[in-house]
Image (tube, helix red, strand yellow):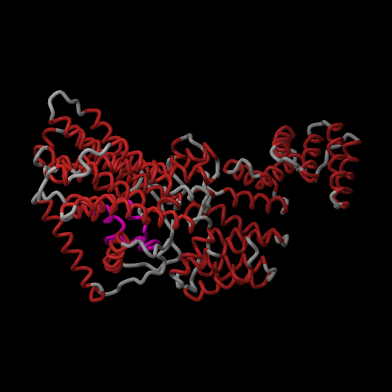
Amino acid sequence: MTTNAKDKPWGGASVWLALLVIFGAGLAAYSNSLNGEFVFDDLHTIVESHHIRQLTPLSISTTGEAGSTVSGRPVAAFSLALNYALGGLEVRGYHIFNVLVHLFAALALFGLVRVTLEACGTPELKCASVGLAFFSALLWVLHPLQTDAINHVSYRTETLVAWFYLAAMYAAARGFAAQERAGRDPRWWYALALLCSFLAMGSKETAAALPLFILLFDRQFGAGSIRAALNQRKLFYAGLVASWICLSLLVLSGNRGETVSFEIEEISSLDYLRTQARGLWLYLRLAFWPQPLVFDYFGVEVVKSWSAVWLESLGLVALFGSCVWGVRNRRPWSLPALMIFAVLAPSSSFIPLTGEVLAEHRLVLPLAAGIPLALAFFWTHLPQKKVALPLGLSLALAAGLLTYQRNEDYRSEESIWRDTVEKRPNNARALNNLFKPLIGRGELAEAELFLRRSLELRPGSVRAWNNLGVLMIAKQEWQAAESAFARSLEIRPRHAKTHYNLGQYYASKSRWAEARASYEVVSLETPEAARGHIGLGQALLHLKQRGAAIVALERGLALKPQAFGAMRNLAWILSTAPEDNLRDGPRALQWAQRLCAGTPAPGPQLEEVLAVALAANGRFDEALTVSERAAQSAQAGGFPQVARQIRRRARLFARGEPYRE
């Protein structure tokens, strides 16, 4: 094939212009994704997490909630804490971070593809290195398969590991090239590669193969052999081994538990492997034809026999064998091809991830290897090079439009779960998860319809029975609610969410002893969650167990400092407890003042707490003033009984007496 400049339209392309177009195209494609709601794992990983609410100590901000998508992944966990420090739970900031990480990863991919093609020694590919790198990064950043990892905030583990993985390989490649040239200092490139390797390991376990691929890259395009690579760059590879050790420690410390599970029966390693054999071909099809895209593949058929997937399995074995052969014989295509297998191996081999048997977000990094490989093959076999530019731009435009369109499905919890149910009507988890947005809008009949369907498909679902109990409370069908909660606890006796909802139900009926029992389970099963301690404190207060109530409320407030209900109850006990050893006027006043200061319009009940706390500190004149204001507010608000109660207590203050229970 001729190699003259006329047939190589990419040789003189501007690198900076290419980077600008990649960045701008990515921004445009995801411009409508910035206001999508927190969904699915985001709720536990972000909304309900207390780990992200502080940047220090690092032992908290880098660990993540147990069972969350960032547990054991400190880089991803800290990024969420950083987002919270900058904007609280304002979802836009989290989406901006995800999009920016994705764009920077695309720039790293551009650099890696370019230096790889320049190092591979093939004149045709070397001449087209900038153009192929440009379209590789452009199609990757716009590919619709990426939308799951970008829009679902807690899946940023995928984009973070992709960014650092690609950046580490790029920096290592630059270091190898610099070391081969006299007068070039490779140390800064090696330092950057090591930093990115550690960051990749701290983002997700799919980075496990990174040191190996850097070594294989060095063997093929740098030192010439593994022995020479290790001899020439001992400290560098020692650092990469250290990042492996770091990853091992993180895997042992992580606890993702039921991050995305939904009471799934155990799947054997062989069943999981057979199912992945079919799933990998699905991934390949979606890479070339990304329709339909599905947010959640829950309920996918588990393959129980090799006879059902013998053809798919043979195909994968042949592909993997050819990759190994290619690496052994230094074929340039073999490294990215083998990288696809290596990146997917932790989640798509024989280690069962029963909560998420298949998932599109796993393809972020494999696509970074597959797209350049496909484009290089296409370029070398394209007889008319001049059609490459319009064809590439057309593909990029189509991908960008599909991505923009797919982002709309993520605009709310309801929209993404409805889309999932439309595409997979027998997805019990999607049917169950439609419950929350529907009940929030008061669509009780439709919510019940989806829940009943979910329970038909999976009658042993703890979460669906729990949600049915909540729905029955909303419908004021008390007996049905208790029956649904009982069924949930029959399946899993110490399910924290069911016990919490049951405790809330008992509290609403003033059944405080039963409420206490449920809240105790919540506080024991989820000690890091404030709501169990706060609910327990409320129940103990009504049961006159004030000392234990103080302990529970203080634990809850330590976890959730802005829990105003807990502040009110704690200030009340510290002000009014008949036991001398429990009363603490100064602390009561601190809590009461903080309570009223944190509420724009405190209202009569909160101001009554402030009045009682003032009286407990002997400030009776102020207590009288606050009491009268609270009584007038209650009277004006249509609560004359509350007003009379406040004024009865105010008469004590007028006599110079504090109020005691």
Q: Residue 562: image x %, image y %? A: 63, 42
Quadrant assignment, res 237: top left
> What is the x, y in percent for residue 103?
37, 43
Decide whether residue 359 is among the magenta residues.
yes
Q: Is residue 565 left or right of residue 30?
A: right
Q: Which residue lies at the image location 64% right of the left edge and 56% below the top edge? A: 516
Q: Is residue 32 above or below residue 477?
A: above
Above/below status of 174 relative to 560: above
Q: Nearer the viewer, residue 284 or 233?
A: 284
Residue 264 lies, with reference to residue 117, above or below; the image says below
Report the magenta residues as a range: 342-364
Q: Residue at the location (80% across, 39% down)? A: 612
Q: Is residue 202 visible?
A: no
Q: Residue furthest top?
A: 183
Q: Is residue 599 left or right of residue 181?
A: right
Residue 299 vs residue 503, the one in the foreground:
299
Number of marks drawn: 0
User: Magenta residues: mostly which secondary structure?
Assistant: loop
The image position of residue 180, as x and y in percent, is 12, 31
595 or 524: nearer the viewer: 595
Please tell me whether residue 581 belongs to the stretch shown in magenta.
no
Visible residue check, residue 195: yes
> Which of the two residues, 486 or 288, is positioned nearer the viewer here?
288
Left or right, 413 with respect to 366, comes to right
Residue ID at (40%, 52%): 149
